[in-house]
Structures are given as C-alpha cells and as structure tokens.
Amino acid sequence: MSRNFALAYAAVLFACAALPLLGDNSTRQLGIEFAATLTLATLWNLLAGYAGIVSIGQQAYVGLGGYVMFALAVFTGMPVLLALPLAGLACGLIAIPAGRLVFRLRGPHFAIGTWVLAEVFRLFFAQISTLGGGSGMSLPIMSILAISHSRPHRLLLFYAFAATLALGTNLLVYLLLRSRFGLGLTAIRDAEPAAASLGVDVMWLKRIVYIGVAAFTGLAGALIFLQNIRISPDAAFSVNDWTANIIFIVVIGGIGRIEGPFIGCLVFFTFRAAFANFGPWYLIGLGALAILIMLLQPKGIAGLLHGLLSRSRKLTLR
C-alpha cells in the first residue's frame, strides 16, 4: 500500500507541475508561489517532522537567499540564473556557524533562538544603505531583460525552475528517509535519548539536516524574490509569510508525512482563494482550522487518509 500511495502521490505532483504550463501568466504566477511554498513546507517538515528540529526562524534563510542573489546580480553583474544556486550555497555556508550557535539551546529556547537569529538578519540588512536599507531594492532592468525580453517566457522559465525545485525536494526527502540517514532521523524524532544510546550521532545528524535545509530554503527564497523583482527587509524576513504560514500548512497537512505539505498547500491556497476578501476573519478561520485539526486529528489530513486506507484494506482482506 505504501508503494502504491507513493506512486499515486508522485503522479499527482507531476500533474500539478504540468498544469500551469497550459495556463496564462496569472496561473503561472500562482504556480510559482505554490511550488515555492511547497518547497519551504517540505523542508520545514523534514526539520520538525523527522529530525525533531522545531525552528521558527527559517525566514532567516529565505531573506538571506534573496539578498545574496540581489547583491550578486547588482554588484557583480552576474546573471541571476547563475546567482540562484550560489545564493543557496551561501545560505548553507552561513548556516554552519549559525547552527553551532543555536544548537547550544534546547527545547523552546532553541525555537526562540532561531527566531531571534532571523530578526538579527532583518535588522542587519535594514542598516545596509547599499542594499536599499529599510526600503529595499529592485533588480536592474538589464538583469531582468537578460533572462528574456518576454514576460510570459520569463514566467514560464521561473515556473519550470520552481516546479523542478519542488519535485526535486520531495524526491530528495523521499530517498533520504529510505536511507540509513533517514532511519537515524526517525529514531531521533521518536526518542532522542534512545537513539543516542544505540550509537546515533544525534547532534551531527541534526546539524547536517539544518545546514542542508538552510541551503535549499535560501534557494527557494532567491527564486521567490527573483520573481517579485524587488526585496526589502520586512518582506524578506517576514515571520508570518515564511514561517507561520508554513507551519500551518505542515500541521494541517500532516507533520512527519511526506505528502503532508502538499495536502496542506492545497488546503491553504484553496482557503485563501475562497476567503481572502473577508479580511481578519480569513486569518481567524485559518487559526481555528489549525486548532481543530491539532485537537481532533493530530496527524493531520494525511494521517486521517492513511488511517481510512488502512481500515479499508483490512476490511477488503477480511
């Protein structure tokens, strides 16, 4: 059943990836946003759902990736498509000393420490006048035209990159969890002291995951702000956009389930499209939905579907 479910999930992912190719510019923009959000949610699910690393400061690497990409394009003249992977690499390198700092903390102190780190980054970039200070900066028009003079073609290229990143991230997590490395992560999540007593190098595994997730988060952040063409400290390091919404998506979809972020993204974007015009009530509704799911179905919608499929299979076998 797990194999069949994985194949069905892969087919749905590929179908969703191909759908915006047939649409207009607005459909492709929505597709870019969906794919980038799915990437961020998948990465946070790997952190919290498998490695037990509950970070509420992942916006630090979203913003950092965007700023590195902008700085490379503006000050060195580097093509933005080449600056994208370098931005992700820079985030991974910066996560090495940052990880050594935040992993000195435990439990809720760790979560708060990651948020404080993101705020430090936000305040730091707000003070750099060459990057626009608090008001931010835009990409030079020549950098945009170097990609393509046609806006539909640029959106198609950005969407292809975003869809590849989302699909690649899901595949990488799937393969990782089927390896000995993934077995160690699952052991840490279930019982960290027991995993350590069996020889699992807990801190090494957590740091490797933290650094890898930071690199891919930075890459996703660079893509998000490349598509926006503008970046500012408040937008780049927004805890609401890049952490609160992502946590909501993972929780309602199913934390610790590889398909959980995808289901959560579908619910989130559908809910937003249907109720965004209701102002504060829209946010209240999102919060109420998250609370209900956490109380009634802690394993999320994916966990509920798995339970229904398991019971159906047992009844069929009988």
Image (cartoon, rainbow, N blue to C red):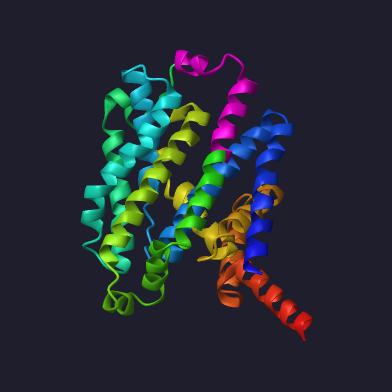
* Residue 233 in view in this figure: no
* Residue 168 shown left or right of residue 21 in the figure: left
- Taking 264 as reference, is 316 above or below it? below
- Residue 164 vs residue 252, the one in the foreground: 164
The quarter of the picture where residue 8 lies is bottom right
Q: Residue furthest bottom?
A: 318
Decide whether residue 144 is among the magenta residues.
yes
For the C terminus, which image quadrant?
A: bottom right
Q: Count how many numbered circles sit on residues in the image.
A: 0
* Residue 267 shown left or right of residue 72 in the figure: right
Tell me which segment is drawn in magenta: 141-163
For the N terminus, which image quadrant?
A: bottom right
Q: Residue 289, percent across and down?
A: 61, 65
- Residue 295 vs residue 226, the one in the foreground: 226
Q: Residue 312, percent across and down?
A: 75, 77
Decide whether residue 189 is among the magenta residues.
no
The quarter of the picture where residue 54 lies is bottom left
Point 58% across, 23% down: residue: 154
Point 32% across, 48% down: residue: 118
Point 43% across, 65% down: residue: 50
- Taking 113 as reference, is 166 above or below it? above
* Residue 97 in view in this figure: yes
